[in-house]
Image: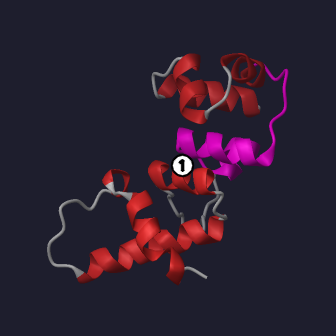
Amino acid sequence: MANLGERIRERRLHLHWTQDALAEKARLSKGFLSDLENNNRSIGADRLLDLARVLGLSLDFLMKGEVAEQAPMQIVIPTRLANLAKEKDLPFSKALVLLEMRRQIIAHRSTTKSDDPEDFDWEGFYESVKTFIP
């Protein structure tokens, strides 16, 4: 069974990314990523979550190599929202509130320029609704 480093490397290669590309996307140094892939380093939970998000993998799979048979509802945090949350030091719960607010607005509009959450202006949206977020 593959270990954490091997699962990271396999996914990176599957995506046709270099170590440089993944390191940049995950905001890690290339040396750290190389050590991680070769099982010479460990990684903290916050960085592992960022890495899982960038790789498009669940934490469960990344950590244990197992895919849950009946996985709970998966919530995908768009990269731009995740970056905003990190920049503004927003907890996960507030990022989820923003995501849900946007979903509800999109659901009630008959026409929208784009449904793609990656193309959405998360910072402008956050600034306009932050007083309503608990």
Question: Quadrant location of residue 65?
Answer: top right
- Amino acid type of disc 1? Asn
Q: Is residue 53 magenta?
A: yes
Residue at image x 45%, y 50%?
A: 80
Q: Main structural element of the magenta stretch: helix, strand or loop?
A: helix
Q: With respect to residue 32, does 124 lie above or below?
A: below
> Position of 2 compared to 130: left or right?
right
Please tell me how crowded label 1 is: few (under 14), some (14-19), or many (20+) other residues with Cα within 10 Å: some
- Count of numbered circles on the image: 1
Residue sitting at x 71%, y 42%: 48
Mark 1 = which residue?
Answer: 83
99 or 69, which lies in front?
Answer: 99
- Percent x, y of residue 63: 75, 44
Against 88, residue 103 (above or below) is: below
Q: Which residues are magenta?
A: 38-65
Q: Relative to 7, is 92 above or below?
A: below
State the image quarter where residue 8 is shown: top right
What residue sits 68% from the left and 50% below the top?
A: 59
Q: Which quadrant would residue 92 be assigned to in this image?
A: bottom right
Verify whether residue 67 appears in magenta: no
**Would residue 61 appear left or right of 3 to someone viewing this image?**
left
Residue drawn where x is 18% and y is 61% of the image: 113
- Give the image location of residue 82, x and y in percent: 54, 53
Q: Is residue 41 above or below residue 31?
A: below
